[in-house]
Image (cartoon, rainbow, N blue to C red):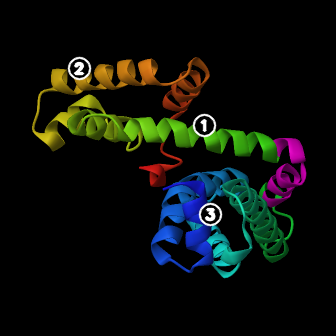
Amino acid sequence: MTEREIIEGLKGDLQCVFDRVFDEFFPQMQFFATRLIGDGEEARDIVNQVFLSLWNLRSRFETLVNIKAFLYITTRNHCFNYLRRRQRQQAGKKEYESRLAVIADEHNVELRMIESEVMQKIYDKIEELPNRCKQIFKLTYLEGLHAGEIAKQLNISTSTVTTQRHIAIKYLKAVLSEEDFLALLLLVDGGLSIIPHFC
């Protein structure tokens, strides 16, 4: 679907076009919100509200860049409002003060936006893995399971699990840019489980 078809579809109230935009941008917006507020479930609710706003204003957009800018700015604003409410409800909680400071800092927000874009690229490539390979990769790095646990769950040998993990990493190294692959390694090292919704 071309950009023009998307814009015209939104203006024409086509639910299938909105669903396409939702599927394309929801995961990275949820990742972005999660990184700002530190709560995946609340982030999901926030991003659902943002997409409701997008639907209500769908006829106003002329480009995908406009849509993406709206999504990031509105998500940031909703996150800011959420943290301010939480801070008032739980006065003195340093956690909310520090997160509010992060959102107020434009540089930090830009970094989170870039991070979200990189994560989307990585997860798109993970989805291209062969089914068994993808399943093992996700169980390892998204669910945090060890080779033995995966082998038992899938009724395969531990060596098959190890081989499939190596195949996945080798493939991702070949298809990702050097910078994106480095980001993947950092996430694998730190655990990818903060964003299971991408997959």
Question: Mark number for residue 163?
Answer: 2
Along the viewing direction, whichever of 50 and 194 lies nearer the viewer: 50
Q: Which secondary structure, mark 3?
A: helix
Q: Is residue 119 left or right of residue 16?
A: right
Residue depth check, mark 3 versus mark 1: number of the one nearer the observer: 1
* Residue named by callout 3: 43
C-alpha gap between disc 2 and disc 1: 26 Å
Dividing the picture into quadrants, the one containing residue 175 is: top left
Q: Is residue 80 left or right of residue 38?
A: right
Along the viewing direction, whichever of 73 and 142 lies nearer the viewer: 73
Question: Mark number for residue 154?
Answer: none
**Picture residue at 83% right of the left edge, 54% below the top:** 103
Mark 2 crowd level (few <14, some 14–19, many ≥20, 10 Å Cα) = few
List x then y, in percent, for residue 116: 63, 44
Mark 3 crowd level (few <14, some 14–19, many ≥20, 10 Å Cα) = many
Residue span colored magenta = 96-108
C-alpha gap between disc 3 and disc 1: 19 Å
C-alpha gap between disc 3 and disc 2: 35 Å
Residue 101 colored in magenta in the image: yes
List x then y, in percent, for residue 106: 88, 47
The kind of residue on which mark 3 rests is Ala
Examine the rendering and report whether any part of residue 48 can be seen: no
Q: Is residue 166 above or below residue 127?
A: above
Q: Is residue 94 left or right of residue 50?
A: right
**Picture residue at 69% right of the left edge, 56% below the top:** 68
Q: Is residue 146 left or right of residue 199?
A: left
Question: Mark number for residue 118?
Answer: 1
Along the viewing direction, whichever of 163 and 73 lies nearer the viewer: 73
Provide the major secondary structure of the magenta segment: helix
**Picture residue at 66% right of the left edge, 56% below the top:** 64
